[in-house]
Image (cartoon, rainbow, N blue to C red):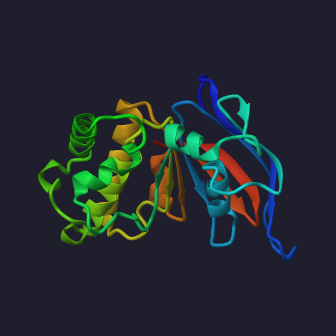
Amino acid sequence: MNDNPVLLSVEDVSKEYPDGNVRALDGVSFEITTGEYAAIMGPSGSGKSTLLSILGTLDRPTSGTLTFEGAVVDEKTDLDELRSRAIGFVFQSFYLLPTLTALENIQVPMFGRGMTVAERVAKAHELIEAVGMADRSKHLPKQLSVGQRQRIAIARSLANDPRLLLADEPTGNLDTVTAAGILELFEQLHTEREMTLITVTHSEEVAHAAQRVIRMRDGRIESDQSNLAMN
């Protein structure tokens, strides 16, 4: 944690599913400050992916409060607008459009943002260069390795200059060497762009790369510790 302002917070957040038999989250509370790099860890069923969905406003809590940049996120909030302007997502399965080139995939979130074609292309070139994939700009996803696809997905997540980047098992489909490269890229984004970054993972290696590790079990926070002394 640092002395920067709080970017988002969850207060006593719980999530129950309609059948009433599953409580995925049970009274979770914590804050993330601007520029922080945190990892959320836990075994399958611990609630970490549900928590990430709530942090990214893809799901709503059953009870409790989510606050982003000092404003409560509730039924009055335009969630599409919030996500498009402030939150980037990196998914384990990439979700690249198969008929678009790498450069075109990066531009997808920019549509509807009032940018000209030239501005979109220039921004996409900047981002594909930032993730070390400029020489693959004209390739389709099927022509890229798994690690290359993840890098393009990361570049796409940065298209609208989000204040918060959320990554769900970002190295889950990658071999050890490729995963290490993705973690180096995350550290570069965090350091050079002062990106606020939250990863959800079951990997100790991914968690160790973060400044802070929030460990979950059975829908609750089991521990919340700084990694700075070890890194």
Seen from the viewer's position, the closer of residues 224 and 165 is 165
Q: Is residue 128 visible?
A: yes
Seen from the viewer's position, the closer of residues 10 and 18 is 18
* Quadrant of the image occupied by residue 192: top left
Q: Position of residue 163 (x, y in %)?
A: 50, 35
Residue at the limit of the structure toward the left, as seen here: 135
- Compared to residue 125, the image places residue 199 above or below, namely below
> Which residue occupies 33% across, 65% down?
97
Q: Position of residue 1 (x, y in %)?
A: 60, 33
Q: Is residue 188 left or right of residue 93?
A: left
> Which residue occupies 67% across, 61% down?
50
Q: Position of residue 104 (x, y in %)?
A: 26, 53
Q: Position of residue 110 (x, y in %)?
A: 38, 43
Q: Quick one: quadrant of the C terminus? A: top left
> Which residue occupies 17% across, 53% down?
137
- Compared to residue 78, the image places residue 192 above or below, namely above
Q: Is residue 164 visible?
A: no
Seen from the viewer's position, the closer of residues 51 and 225 is 51
Q: Is residue 99 left or right of residue 91?
A: left
* Quadrant of the image occupied by residue 17: bottom right
- Compared to residue 49, the image places residue 7 above or below, namely above
Residue at the limit of the structure toward the right, as seen here: 20
Could you tell me how many numbered marks the image carries? 0
